[in-house]
């Protein structure tokens, strides 16, 4: 969440999506990439041991074929 967005009171869904995945033992699907020491979704998920993948990873884990 950027400082500007926080100060403007803009709604931010990321923390709620991550928390829901933790509580429901789910998986977060995101287009963000893992960047050490950066507040990106995959980094937060890794810290809290939450399964996280991208769309391609979702398709592979679900066995989708096109």
Image: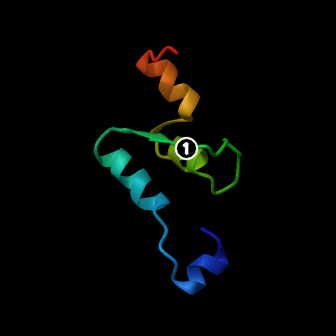
Q: Residue at x 46, y 18 (%)?
A: 64
Q: Looking at this rendering, what residue extends furthest in the front direction?
A: 66
Question: What is the quadrant of the N terminus in the image?
Answer: bottom right
Rate crowding at label 1 as few (under 14), some (14 to 19) or many (20 or more) other CA atoms within 10 Å: some
Of 62 and 34, nearer the camera is 62
Identify the element where label 1 is drawn: loop
Of 59 and 36, nearer the camera is 59
Residue 55 drawn at (x, y percent)? 54, 33
The image quadrant of residue 30 is top right
35 over 38 or under it: above or below: above
Q: Residue at x 52, y 15 (%)?
A: 66
Q: Residue at x 56, y 50 (%)?
A: 41
**Left of 14 or right of it: where is 36?**
right
**Left of 1 or right of it: where is 52?**
left
Residue identifier under label 1 = 30
Residue 32 drawn at (x, y percent)? 64, 46
Residue 23 drawn at (x, y percent)? 30, 48
């Amino acid at each position: 969440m950027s400082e500007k967005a926080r100060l403007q009171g803009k709604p931010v869904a990321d923390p709620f999506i991550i928390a829901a995945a933790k509580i429901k033992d789910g998986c977060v699907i995101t287009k963000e990439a893992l960047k050490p020491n950066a507040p990106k979704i995959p980094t937060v998920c890794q810290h809290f041991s939450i399964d996280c993948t991208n769309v391609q990873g979702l398709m592979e884990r679900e066995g989708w074929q096109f």
